Amino acid sequence: MLARIQSFATGIASKAQTYTTKTFYYSKVVGELSKQVYLKEGLQPPAISDFQSVYTKLYKQALDLALKPRQSLSLFKNIQKDSVLKYGAYGVQLAGLYSLGEVIGRRKVVGYTNYAAHH
């Protein structure tokens, strides 16, 4: 019994070491590739003033909507019935595709396979 537990633990440790090695390797590859793209494209992070201007504007808009709820509801008066139906249909299609993916992933229509019951 003890030998079986030790062999099981050794197997898990070797698999963990293999996955760790692969993870470090691929993270370094992605890092080097990102560095090359960053240098070739001449990318640079946005300035602090850009962040401040964007978030100040968003804060002011949110504050205006919170302080004037009746005027913020007027934004929805210009929405056409056809647009609501069209985007609602897109939403139903996306929900259906997501549900179909869940069914394919589970390989069952309802619930997940209980592997503990097989042992």
Image (cartoon, grey):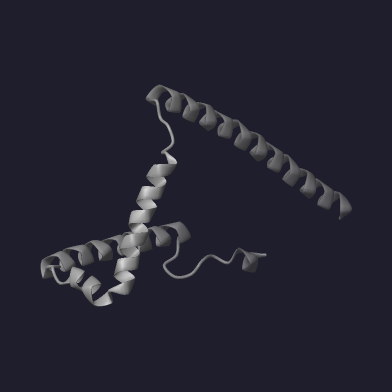
Dividing the picture into quadrants, the one containing residue 116 is: bottom right
> Percent from the top left, x then y, of residue 119?
67, 65
Q: Residue furthest right?
A: 2
Nearest the viewer among 56 and 110 is 56
Q: Is residue 22 above or below residue 116?
A: above
The residue sitting at 71% across, 38% down in the picture is 17
Which quadrant does the N terminus fall into? bottom right
Nearest the viewer among 2 and 23 is 23
**How many tags in the picture?**
0
Nearest the viewer among 65 and 41 is 65
The residue sitting at 33% across, 55% down in the picture is 57
Q: Is residue 52 above or below residue 96?
A: above
> Percent from the top left, x then y, of residue 81?
12, 70
> Percent from the top left, x then y, of residue 9?
78, 48
Q: Is residue 69 left or right of residue 75?
A: right
Q: Is residue 46 above or below residue 93?
A: above
Dividing the picture into quadrants, the one containing residue 39 is: top left
Nearest the viewer among 108 and 31 is 31
The residue sitting at 11% across, 66% down in the picture is 82
Q: Is residue 94 left or right of residue 33?
A: left
> Percent from the top left, x then y, of residue 96?
31, 63
The residue sitting at 15% across, 64% down in the picture is 83
Q: Is residue 119 above or below residue 31?
A: below
Q: Residue furthest bottom?
A: 70
